[in-house]
Image (cartoon, rainbow, N blue to C red):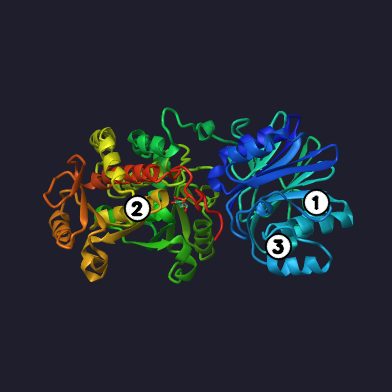
Amino acid sequence: MCSIIGYRGKLDAAPLIVESLKRMEYRGYDSVGVATSNEGKILMRKGVGRVVEVNKLFNLGKLPGQIGIGHTRWATHGGVVNSNAHPHTACTNDIAVVHNGIIENYMELKEEITNLGHTFKSQTDSEVIAHLLEIYYLDSKDVKEAIIKTCKRLQGAYAFVAIFEDGVIGGARYDEPLIIGILDEGYFISSDVLGFLEHTDRAIFLDNQDIAIIDGGELQLFDFNGLPVKRPITQVAWELGAADKGKYAHYTLKEIHEQTSTIIQAGTQNIDRMQNFCDIILNAKSVYITGSGTSYNSALIAKQIFAKFAKIRVETILSSEFQYVHDLIDNNSVLIAISQSGESSDVLQSVKTAKQKGAKILSVVNIQTSSLARISDSSLGVNCGPEIGVAATKSFTGQVSLIYHIADNLCNNCIGFVHKNKELISAIEFVLDNEYKIAEIANNMKDVRDIYLLGRSVHYPLALEGALKLKELAYVHAEGIAAGELKHGPLALVDLNTVVIVINPSDATFNDTISNAHEIKSRGAKVIGISDSENHLYDQFIKIPKVSELLYPLVEVIPLQILAYFLALKKNADPDYPRNLAKSVTVK
Ligand code: G6P
């Protein structure tokens, strides 16, 4: 999964494309490439590394021409080497293409095309698109026909943009996003509005199975049968593009600090929309929640909160597992999909399946222009602004905060969450003010190989989330464990070299979790306690303030994020762009 961008207009394409790619790097950052069309010739430069590095080496932004395409890659098929970087050309160099997604039948296509005498230069699935376009274009010299015929051959999920020798740009989408940005000086065609938001807030979100062709100053849209289609122009919120590091060394640190305000923003919802969202839940016979990664951890918290306060039974299903376990979902069901990006392939696939079975779709999503928000029956925005750091931080607390607001609405304000804003903010500020103490703890953990995180009840999903942050950011083996399960197996792993983080605020779980801390301590492991109440068992103690019980999850996650961030720094890892990961995983 990758980012793709194309531009045709009156401005120089390559420098615009390089800037766009920097903004969309969260989608993949293994390698990068740009191709332009200039005086009837296609020029191309590409290489392995981040946009800034490759641009410095190969001057991508210096390619001449006012027509171009660009790509950042997150490798799926073929290693991270220059030849697998996009754009890809076929045999004649008359066409170059950038692709996001996976072409599932690429092996068959490759064999067929090779038998026609074509030679492949990469191991990617994407290169088949370039060859198919070339075959059909050489046949007809018609861009539209070449794209339609190519799409008919492809299986899988894809969005691609191609430039042709005569400077025409063509793109198509099937289950991957593609958005047009409209400028006075031309058009962008991009995976994400962030690709062009610096230049325009006017966008056209292409429907699935749409084709866009930019020829001269004109944009034409067609469906896969070649029939002209019209799509509305949407005005996108400018704030989405407002992402810089400010005074912070990394986006991740900035986003951790922003939580004092983003947690509150999540509660700013349109009353009617919230009511409609909750009515759909109340009218459903069964409620399911799905999500991936951090968003799934939010779903686990939602399950507990909905049961405890709204007395609503909810089943959680990991989005990647959804296709195997949806048997009981029907037209009396509602599926709540939680996602920061609203573009995770597994989440969108789950929603598609549930929709086909007649279920209503609700979503809790940060990017309100995303595919998920657009296909939901009702959607609530997390409102935390752009999250650039690949590991989710402020979107997690935003999701959890919004879940509390939804639960409050479902139970006639039995939680009174909105009245706890002040208490919550001052607790988070306390943790952030003491960030340096957590950094000191992280400094001594550089060589730790295994970290276990324990929590009970609602603190168990927090243990999972803390472990996920440590894995993603600091590349350390970390496991979240329901504290009571320790004795049923994991205790066998605990020895003198283990670090165990105990999430143990003083609520109903406190005494039982302290017993677990004893069990660990007597096996010689090092115990780090996160609590409002100190204990002699803790070798190191991260203090959080005493707050109303239901606020603990939102407070205790902050030190876990900070610990992972500083441990990443200690290990010389880039916390914003962890190796092998991408923020928005748009492939299965
Ligand atoms: C990727 C990211 C995770 C994120 C997950 C779900 O794996 O690296 O940090 O939690 O996707 O993303 P979503 O946008 O659907 O919340």
Q: Are marks 2 and 3 in contact (CB under 8 Å)?
A: no
| Residue 465: assigned label | 2
| Residue 144: assigned label | 1
Q: Please name the amino acid that badge 1 sits on.
A: Lys
Q: Is residue 259 or residue 489 the one in the foreground? A: 489
Q: Earlier in the sequence, mark 1 or mark 3?
A: 1
Q: Which residue is mark 3?
A: 154
Q: Nearer the viewer, mark 2 or mark 1?
A: 2
SS class, disc 2? helix
Q: In percent of the image, x 49 and y 33: which residue is there? A: 243
Q: Earlier in the sequence, mark 2 or mark 3?
A: 3
Q: In percent of the image, x 66 and y 33: which residue is there? A: 16
Write down the quadrant of residue 58 in the picture: top right
Residue 450 location (% of width, % of height) = 32, 58
- Respond yes or no on whether mark 2 lies under 8 Å from ligand 1: no
Gap between marks 2 and 3 measured at Cα: 37 Å
Write down the quadrant of residue 336 in the picture: bottom left
The answer to whether one can see residue 203 in this image is no
Residue 99 location (% of width, % of height) = 67, 52
Residue 312 location (% of width, % of height) = 30, 58
| Residue 152: assigned label | none
Q: Nearer the viewer, mark 1 or mark 3?
A: 3
Q: In percent of the image, x 38 and y 46: which residue is there? A: 396
